[in-house]
Every structure is written in structure tokens, then in C-alpha cells.
Image: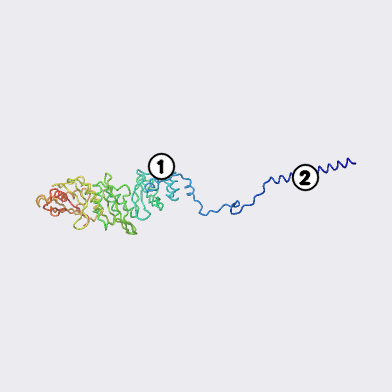
Amino acid sequence: MKNASTITAFIISFLVVGSLALVFLFLGNREEEPAPAEPAAQTEVPPRQTVTPQPTVDPLTKEDISRQTATPSSLVNLSSPQTLAQAIAKVIQDRDADTLKSLEIQQAVTEAQGRIIRELMEARHVRLSTPGITSIGANNQGANPTARYTLNFSSGARGYLDMKRNDKQQWTLDTLTLPSKQDLAKDKAAPMAMNDPMGIVSSFMDAVAKADFRTARKFVDGTKVQDATVAGLCILFEEGAFRLREDAPIKTAYEAPTNAGFFVHLQDAQGRKAGNVGLTVAKKDEQWLIAEASLDNMLEAYTKRQGAGDDIFIPIVKNPQGGDSLALFFGFNEDSLSKRSERQLQIVAEAIKMDSGKKLEISGHTDDVGSERYNQGLSERRAAAVKAQLVQFGVPAERIVTKGFGKSQPRRTYSPTADEGTRDEARKENRRAEMYLDF
């Protein structure tokens, strides 16, 4: 009995001790686990959001996204209108899609313009000639200057790139004007004329540079600018080997809704400055036309370039009756025409034949060397020589009137005390025949 009690007590003690051990073990593990941190204030660590934040600006366009991925080496230099025009020409001629993409990325061309340029790029029959672009002119007035270039297609057709400098000092394509698809496909298409002030001046000067009187006259208001002035300008251009300046030859002096003024800058055959032509255009029945032409600066530049000898040739002179006359010059005691004079008379013949009602008055003149009787006959022979050549070029003889004035109407005079050199220069200018087209 005593043994049974002892065993029972032992079992109870074992259970009690085991229970206590489990309790302490559990409590010990709780003390080793770190206490949970106090929740942070809302202002220091905001709770995680699952809602997509709304943008505070307009969503990025395709151009914005592309611009972010563009590299500096792929961008086009837009600091001048020439580099922009060259880039557009490169796209078309070289089928350069990468450059077109760069122009779109830089917003140098609009999306609509880009589509048109891409069509030209992908058209197999569209090619540019050499040079692919030509600088026409510029208007540097105002905060945003403009410039115009042509796209010269191999078909002979012509497109126009009108560019403007933006407020970031970068040039962008403002207007793209293209010829018809038919003209692009032709072998020899006529260049398209732009019916705006600079376009008319450009087309007029192109014709003058080719000594094409018939075409040049189409861009002139005949009631304000004489045929003699147009013909004289054609002659002077050819005689003096004038050229349009390569970089923006046409500069805008002023521009108003119904009229505008321009200076056309020239160079000689060696690329040197050679004066300018002042032209005014006016709007007449929705058509822009040349209304005034000032050749004084060009004539002055031409005169300075002439050397000594009997080859002086200033084709435009003032007529005592008003207006301009054309002049041909002769050597001492000569009444025959030079090959050069014959070429210039071809232009005069075109002017006369274009107007069936127009007549021509030719007056012959001499210097003051020799008797009045001899010089009278010489002046008549000079006028007759000019008439004969014009008749040979197809001008009806009955439309030409000739007169001889001998030495009575000198173009240039000199004082009795003038030196020999001064007298010789004056005499050269007086040995002439003058043609007056508008009487």
C-alpha cells in the first residue's frame, strides 16, 4: 500500500514538472520573437497604391516618344534653311527614310508633309536633277524670317519649299508646293510659276537670264514697264555675263497686300558681286505682275567692269521723248554690225513681232569728228544697217522708221578744255544707233 502511494506521487510529480517545462518553453519562444513595430505615420510611408496615377499633362504623342529615343547623330541640323532643303532633297533622291524620320521627330515637317515627301521618295519615276535644290530668295523682316528653295525634278518640273524659322531659331517647312503628277512624269515639263510676289520675280528673272524676252514679258504689266526696258535687261544680262547670286538672290525690301518690292542680287561670271536690280510687283486682277524695274545699280556695276576700247555697250538709254531706248554702238567710221549686236537684235525682233501694232523708230548718230555732211550720211547708214538686220529676223520693213541725226544729238558731251581721254570716251558713246519701241 505504501509502495502504491509512492508510485502515484511520483507520476503526479512527473506530470507537474513536465507541464511547467512546456509552459516555460512556450514563454521562452515568445520572448525571442521581436515585438511588432508600431505602425508608421501615414505622412512618412504612404500605403502601397494599386491605382494607376493619372497624368498631369497631355499624353505623349508618337513624335514625343520617338524624340526621346533619337540620338544626336541622327538629328538634322536645322540652323539654316539650306540644310533643311538639302535634307528634304536627300530623302527624295536617296530614298532616305531615316532622314525623313528625323525630320518628323524634330517637327521640321508636319505629319501631312511627311506623307507627301514619303510618296515622292517611294515613287520610282521621281528623281531630282543636279542640283536638286536652288535658293530663290529670303525675307529677313520680322521675328520669323522665311526662305524659299526650289526642288528641281529631272522631268524639268519644279516644286517649292517655303521655310520659316521658329521661335527656337530652328527652320521648319512651312509650305510644300509640288507640280502635278503628270508634270513629274513628263520628259520635259515646263517649270511651274508661283503666283505670289517672290514667285513672279523669280520667274521673270529666270527668263531674263536666258534672254527669253517672250517669256519675261508675260510677267510684266505692259502699261507700266516698257518693252524696251525688258529687252534691254535681257541684252544687258547676256552682254555682261550676269548671273543670279547663288545664295538667296531675291531679297524682300517690303511686302504689302497689293504690292511688294525686291532687290535681285547679281554676280559676274567669276562669282563676284555685280550690283542688283530693283523690282516692284503689284497685284492686278488677282495676278501679280512686275510694275517697276530699276536698273541703275546694275548699269553702274556693268560700266565699272568695262575696259578701254570700242567695245563699250550700255544697251538701255533714256529717250528724249520719254521712256527707255535700246542702243547699239559702232566703231570709229563704221556702219556695219558686230556679231554681238546681231545677237541683241534678235531679242529686239522678238519684242516687235509679239505686238503687230508696234512700230520701231531707229535713229543713227555719230561723234563730232568730221564734217556735218559726212556724219549725216554715216548716221543714216547706221540706222539702215540696223533696219536691214531686223528685217532679216522677220520684222516687216513697213513697221520700221529710220532717221539720221549726224552729230547733232550727242549722248555725252565734253568741255573744250577736256583732255584727250575724256574726249575719246565721249565719242565712243556717241557712235550709236538708238531704237525706240514705244511711240
The x, y position of residue 228, in whole percent, is: 23, 53
| Residue 270 pos. (x, y %) | 27, 44
Residue drawn at x 41%, y 52% is 168
Q: Which residue is mark 2?
A: 20
**Quadrant for the C terminus in the image:** bottom left
Disc 1 target residue: 94
**Scheme by which the image is coloured:** rainbow
Kind of residue sitting beneath label 1: Asp
Q: Nearer the viewer, residue 142 or 96?
A: 142
Return the x and y of residue 206 as percentages of the image width and height.
30, 49
| Secondary structure at numbered mark 1 | helix
Kind of residue indicated by mark 2: Leu
- Categorize mark 2 by other alpha carbons within 10 Å: few (<14), some (14-19), many (20+): few
Q: Is residue 138 visible?
A: yes
Question: Which residue of the protein is positioned furthest toward the top in this rendering?
Answer: 3
Structural crowding at the residue carrying mark 1, measured as other residues with C-alpha within 10 Å and reported as few (<14), some (14–19) or many (≥20) = few
* Image x and y of residue 14, in percent: 81, 42
Whether residue 122 is visible, yes or no, is no
Q: CA distance from mark 2 to mark 1?
A: 94 Å
395 with respect to 262 (left or right): left
Checking the image for residue 172, the label placed there is none
Q: Is residue 51 left or right of residue 387?
A: right
Front residue of 329/383: it is: 329
- Taking depth in this image into account, of 402 and 120 the one nearest to the observer is 120
Which quadrant would the N terminus be assigned to in this image? top right
Q: In the image shown, does 215 or 205 lie closer to the viewer?
A: 205
